[in-house]
Amino acid sequence: MSSVPVQQPSDSTEFTVEAVERALQQLYYDPDMTQKNVAQKWLSQAQASPQAWLFCWALLRPDKVPEIQFFGASTLHAKITRHWTDLPAEQHESLRSQLIAEVGRFSCGPKMVLTRLCVALASLILHNLLDSWTTAVPDLLRAFQGGEGSVEVDVRHQALLEVLVVLPEELQIRKLPAERRAHLQRALAQEWSSLCPILRQILRKETTAGQVKERVLRCLSSWLALDVDLGESEGLLQDSFTLLKERELFDTAVETLVSAISQCDCQRFVDSLLKMMPQVLALQEPLKKSVQDRDMETCHGICRIAVALGETHCRTLLEQVDQWQGFQALVSMILSCTGMPGHYPVDETSSSLTLTFWYTLQDDIMSLDTEKQTLYLQVYRPVYFQLVEVLLHKARFPSDQEFTSWSSDDKEQFRTYRVDISDTLMCVYELLGPELLRNLYDKLGVLLTDTTHSSSWQDVEALLYGFQSIAETVDVSYSDVIPGLIGLIPLITATNVQLAETIMLTIGSLAEWLADHSIMLAGALRLVLQALSNADLSVSTVSTLKRICRECRHHLRPHANDILTASQEVLVKQIHKTTQIMWLMQALGYLLSSLPDEEILGKLLSLLSPHIQQLERLANETPSPASKLSTLHILGLISSIFSTLDLNTQREGQEDSRNSHFQPHANPVVVVLQQVFPLIQTLLSKWLKETEVVTAACAVFEKSLKTLIRDFAPLVDQLCELIGQLFSSYPQACALDLTRQLVHVFACEKEHFPPIAALLELVTSITMAIFQHGARDHPDVADSFMQLHTQVMKRKPDVYLTGGLDIKVVFYCGILSFKFPETPTVKSTCLLFTELISHCEDLPEVREVLQEDGLLLLQTLLESIGGQSRGLLEHQSEVMFSVSRYCPTLLSLQLRDALQPPGFPSALLTPEQKEHFCQQVLREQLSKWKMRDVIKEFSLLCQGLPGVEYAASY
């Protein structure tokens, strides 16, 4: 159809067939998006109009194009679903007859129109099934089972099956009260016994077309979701297994069987499940053939069926002890799926489906009573040892040549697959215990020391990967094979990057063990430092060095010079990327923390002096993109090393550690910070509006503050002055975050808090001005401001008593922040008010502002709750609970007033619902969890979404 200029629909246009057709042409063919939107809006109004009950039939006439017919069917569905009460009861029967006739007329297509009409008919059935049309399903069967000739029969069957498929689906997606939904589900389920023979008859008829058989299978899947009797479905399920042999129906048959087997309620029908077992096991031969033929799709489908049965009903099948051999055969079948030949994901995609089953089987065995558990452990421990061999084989890398030919997406999928295998091995260790490590160690020893056995680097890497997977999360400190493993690692010739990476990561996973066995540390550290200069091993080597420096810091003194020398060399050569360099600096921070006091400053300056000198040059340069990157890099280096150079907490292994601490002015970190402070000040003056640079500079002080804690005291005055200058010139959230950290550390330090109090007054005054001029463009500043004053109220509430800080400013900024669309900002605002309200007794200023504007707070809170507040209800409910707990008088006097305006906070609320909500809130002063439920229910009512299903997603 060609595009034809049409008259723009207007609100005054009569909703006639001709007008609707013009609007549809405009919607489909007008290139102007504005005009399309106008047409869309008008058509929505047309669908909601009373005239839609009439024009929808005209749009379905045979002479109309499919797009117009589809809109007619969609309109009919919309009217039945949303405007059913508008239709007089005496017209229900004629609507039913007319709609069934239309479904029959469109049974030959177009498919999209037929489906929409069937959905409309399903909606009609759901309206009437419990009262005026209890015989809906039998009536449908009679209406669509006539006809002569195989073609006409297939066509009518197709229409019938389309209705039957969408009927349960429409029930699932309709928003209905739970009780009515349950009644409808039971009413439909009762019809299943009469449907099954008819569906089976259609399925087994030789002349039935493949498309019709496919719809029968989809119908079975759809109705099984209604929790129908599985026993009555046995014949259809048996036919579904048979249809796996028909290539064009294989995928649909698989989906049907998986859907049927995966119904958790099927566990009520144990006999039916046991009858399915031989049929699933009979698929082993087709599975073997598909493996031989490299038919990945068939392999995948059969694996899905086997795993669905084993995973969904593992516990039920284990309970049938007399059937243990059948279940063992199923487990063996799944194990063969796990060990599917070839490399994932290039040669096969089925093995990943099975991994969750092994968790399920293990958990279910361990949850059985002692007698059954003992029996099954004897049966399945050998199976799990086989599983380990299979998993390690599947984790092997392909040959270098083959791996090079893989796409980047294949490589990433393989990496993720290996992570899943690693998690599975960790789980398996819980069942097999230390014997598993011994098994891996023996195999690795044979590979590395027995010259009669040929091995590839892939075999060695896979075994090391198994060790790493277990040691990463399991305490192996008691294992007697780890010393032998540490001794075997130097025997490995790592000529391959993947093998070398796994060696590094394995050493890293043993860092805690090395801390308890420091005699083995030198050899492991030597391997790591040798690999540190290899850019290809950057991530694995640097992360391993960081772990060793963190876990073994009390044993690093003899190795400090070696680590520092190797690290400085790679820093000078710029071998590693920025992220790894930051990790390396963190590792060096741990290392320096372990050194004698008199050595730390010298080594720290040796490390940082070249970078400080470069920072000085940058401070004197004109800003440019290149200088910005260099500045960010150096500030990142300094903040990284200061984040872990912790002289207060790193000496737990030393005697008399308190006496060994520096005086604050002599603390090496303080000395360096004082040296770089003027440079940072100069840089900030040049990069004032560059958020990245300002954030990086603030991070230097924030990381140092977190590790120095009170030893940061000599820098407090300077830093407060710098933050004040920074925030006055160009307010940024990171300055408020740094202020919050100062409050947290020095709130109780009378000597050092005065400059912080002055800074608080300054940033509060500036932020108030931002709110007065419109803070909508600064949600991050609003968020950090809320967090800052929450911290002040927690740590130093008496600061509001001095007169310098006006709690009303904070209150009204919080009111405005409630209206921000950003979830983090509203969350921080809720936390602020929760804390603020709790001080209504001990802070007269808080009590006064609540007395003056408590109504405003309640209205703002209710408006927030009534909006799209998903993810915030817990925090909003805590504010309401805080009001209820600490200000019950305010709540009892003003809650009803807050809800008084009509349509507030939602036009969907009735006066009765508002009153019920008030009674519930006023009653709840003890349980914040009950208050949360009250607020959740109220929020759903405001949005017109009451119901358990929606509430569960909150």
Image (cartoon, rainbow, N blue to C red):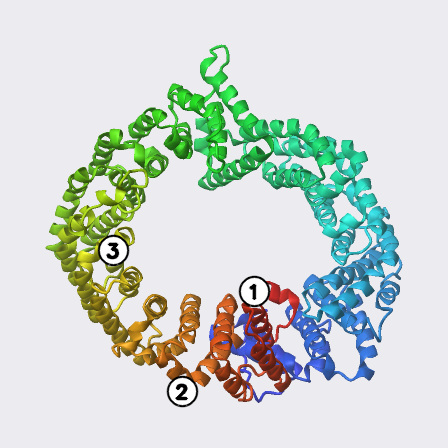
* Closer-to-camera residue (773/102): 773
Depicted 778 relative to depicted 858: above or below:
above
Q: Assign the C terminus to one quadrant of the image.
A: bottom right
Residue at the image position 31 percent from the left and 72 percent from the top: 798
Q: Is residue 42 left or right of residue 593?
A: right
Residue at the image position 65 percent from the left and 31 percent from the top: 336
Q: Amino acid at mark 2?
A: Glu
Q: Amino acid at mark 1?
A: Tyr
Q: Is residue 953 left or right of residue 750?
A: right
Residue 32: x percent and y percent?
47, 73
Q: Amino acid at mark 3?
A: Arg
Q: Earlier in the sequence, mark 3 or mark 1?
A: 3
Q: Which mark is residue 954?
A: 1
Q: CA distance from mark 3 to mark 2?
A: 40 Å
Foreground disc of the pair 1, 2? 2
Residue 848: x percent and y percent?
38, 84
Residue 307: x percent and y percent?
68, 40
Q: CA distance from mark 1 to mark 2?
A: 34 Å
Q: Is residue 909 visible?
A: no
Q: Tag 2: Cα neighbours inside 10 Å, few (<14), some, or many (≥20)? A: few
Foreground disc of the pair 3, 1? 3
Residue identifier under label 3:
710
Q: Secondary structure at mark 3?
A: helix
Q: CA distance from mark 3 to mark 1?
A: 42 Å
Residue identifier under label 2:
852
